[in-house]
Amino acid sequence: MPAAHFNEPEDTAMHKTERFEQEVKKRFINEPGQMKLLVVVDKLLTGFDAPPATCLYIDKQMRDHGLFQAICRVNRLDGEDKEYGYVIDYKDLFRSLEQSITDYTGEAFDGYDKADVQGLLKDRLQQGRERLEEAREAVKALCEPVEPPRDAAAYLRFFCAAESGNAEQLKENEPKRVTLYKLVAALLRAYANLANEMREAGYSDAEAREIKAEVGHYEKVREEVKPAGGDYIDMKMYEPAMRRLLDMYIRAEDSEKLSAFDDRTLVELIVEQGEKAVESLPEGIRGNPEATAETIENNVRRLIIDEMAVNPKYYEKMSELLDALILRRKQEAMDYKKYLAAIVSLAKEAANPETGASYPASIDSAPLRALFDNLEKAQPDADAREAKALALDRAIRNIKRDGWRDYIFKELEVRKAIESELGGGEDSVSAVFEIVKAQHDY
């Protein structure tokens, strides 16, 4: 196992056992979607806390403290959708377990947190059904205001923006989108816990089919809303596990990837692939030109909002161009292919400012472009503006110190360097200082 982990021969890997153990434990705790199973013998019963662990398989004789300690490994809550852990007992140890809990009440386990033992044994099917029904009701309540026919476009208008590309609506609806992602994930996990035992949990065959269809529907909604809202939160920990649950309990076909985005945004895919990036969108969006247009517009708007502080002048221009393009699409019924080419071109300009405007050869970095663009009012002449941008850049790089942001004295040094180059003007100094502060290269 260490040899495979380190990708080297066994005779060298055998000397890295301790490092192997540390890395495996860290991965089990921090990346549960990537490492679902950890097999141990006489290890990790104490001093090991892995809240994502949900299921414990016991295949050895254990009793008293040892048994109790083992069970506590899966009895810790983890987020909003883990309410209890499972113990799969291959050695009929539950009688001993009950005695261990009894002993706890008799002060034999005073050293343990009461959270580890209270409600330790519950009816799994009953609890599972209650959890599934709560998850169903929560998702339905959230999506109830969506207008008929509740297709992809309707869900995008409700969770993203009623007016395509509207920055305020995108921001205002962000909490709703985050709630949707959490509730759908909770619904899928609650369903997976009962999917093979729906009859035993009290559901009829018809009800089981209805619930399965519901889960598939809301997961499809989640899959469409996430890229349409430009929400690319880091899902590495969770997406592999989500795919596994979907492939096992919802889909009958071969395993498939939920999204081609990984950690990239739609705009990044457009820059890389052009119009072909549309094929990466969920089927419900890419099959609807209106939904596709709104999705791309929302993503470009999200990029403009995120980057506005870096170069206000440039991204104000991009925002105006986006507004004009959206208006043309709505008023002139633009040919879809022409529109797609135009929005892809705009997305590339927004993502790569160096390609979207003509800069002097010396203005060859993001900070220099930002200074050059935003000094236009003070320095209308392009040559003078180029010289001033270069002088400012040199002064800032010469004076800035490591970790200067949010450190009042270090910030003051940078601000004085800007003021010295600009020659006064409190408003202009403050504006340039904020742009400088937003630069990644400084």
Image (cartoon, grey):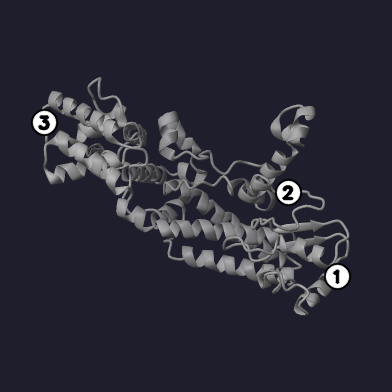
Q: Which mark is residue 37?
A: 2
Q: Earlier in the sequence, mark 3 or mark 2?
A: 2
Q: Is residue 234 above or below residue 107?
A: above
Residue 317, picture quadrant? top left
Q: Nearer the viewer, residue 85 or 435?
A: 435
Name which residue type carries label 2. Answer: Leu
Q: Nearer the viewer, residue 10 or 417?
A: 417
Q: Are marks 3 and 1 in contact (CB under 8 Å)?
A: no
Q: Residue at x 51, y 46 (%)?
A: 234
Q: Which of the image's four quarters has the N terminus?
A: top right
**Gap in Å between the C-alphas at discs 3 and 2?**
64 Å
The image shows residue 13 at horizontal and vertical percentages of 75, 31
Dot 3 crowding, Cα within 10 Å, few <14, some 14–19, many 20+: few
Q: Is residue 162 visible?
A: no
Dot 1 crowding, Cα within 10 Å, few <14, some 14–19, many 20+: some
Q: Earlier in the sequence, mark 3 or mark 1?
A: 1
**Gap in Å between the C-alphas at discs 3 and 1?**
84 Å
Q: Secondary structure at mark 2?
A: loop
Name which residue type carries label 1. Answer: Ser
Q: Which residue is mark 3?
A: 380
Residue 206, picture quadrant? bottom right
